Image (tube, grey):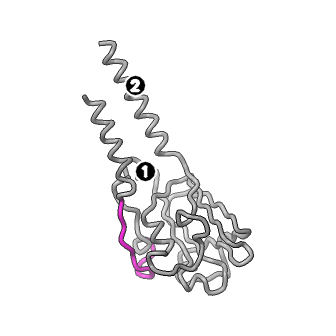
Amino acid sequence: MAGFLKTEISSVVLLIFLFASFSEARDLIIGGKPNAWRIPTSESDSLNHWAQKSRFIIGDSLVWEYDGSKDSVLQVTKRDYVTCNTSSPIETYTGGNTKVKLERSGPYYFISGAEGHCQKGQKLIVVVISEKHRHFNGVSPAPTPAEIEGPAVAPAPTSGAGRLTGGFLMLALAALLVV
């Protein structure tokens, strides 16, 4: 009986540790690689393609690495994102190494501050999931920019396969607790 209780307590402690580690905020390099803040060479090279395959939670930080003498990052409204309006940004980031903390759920819109770059596709929508959708959400894909802003951006195919492992691991651990 004591062995069973010890195993059960160990399983619960492990499960709590895993929940805590899955909910920690992260620093995410834009595009998943340095210097990805540039005009995309194709639709599949678009930063929105990367963002659609990613999950963003409150507390995460986005990190841009770029040539600060030639470019900047502007956080803008949905309307300014769609029209590539650089004249009235919410925030302006310069210097080549920008870090933006995601402090609320919902969409964030970013465009390049360099002349003509936004019109050529150098822009990004990041959707931060709400606290209520945070648990066991690893199987469904992130919302596409088209779901957030309408038909202005063509949606790219999405896949939740990158997060399936974490959800599967949780289900396997839950099954161990039952046994």
Instruction: Report which residue position mark 1 lands on.
Output: 134
Other residues around mark 2 within 10 Å, as few (<14) / some (14–19) / many (≥20)? few
In the rendered image of this protein, does residue 137 appear above or below residue 114? Answer: above
Which of discs 1 and 2 lies nearer the camera? The answer is 2
Q: Quadrant of residue 16?
A: top left
Report the side of 109 relative to 88 (left or right): left
Say which label, 1 or 2, has the lower sequence index.
2
Q: Residue furthest top?
A: 2
- For the N terminus, give its image quadrant: top left
User: Which amino acid lies under the numbered mark 1 shown in the image of this protein?
Assistant: Arg
Q: Secondary structure at mark 1?
A: loop
Magenta highlight on residue 149: yes
Residues shaded magenta: 148-160
Residue lying at 56% horizontally and 85% vertically, measured from the top left: 119
x then y, percent, for residue 117 = 60, 83
- For the C terminus, give its image quadrant: top left
Report the side of 50 relative to 5 (left or right): right
x then y, percent, for residue 172 = 30, 39
Say which of 59 and 170 sits in front. 170
Residue lying at 53% horizontally and 66% vertically, measured from the top left: 31
The tally of labels here is 2
Instruction: Report which residue position mark 2 lands on.
Output: 10
x then y, percent, for residue 102 = 57, 58
Residue lying at 74% horizontally and 68% vertically, measured from the top left: 95
Magenta highlight on residue 5: no
Q: CA distance from mark 1 to mark 2?
A: 25 Å
In the rendered image of this protein, does residue 134 appear above or below residue 31? Answer: above
Question: Which secondary structure is most common in the magenta stretch?
Answer: loop
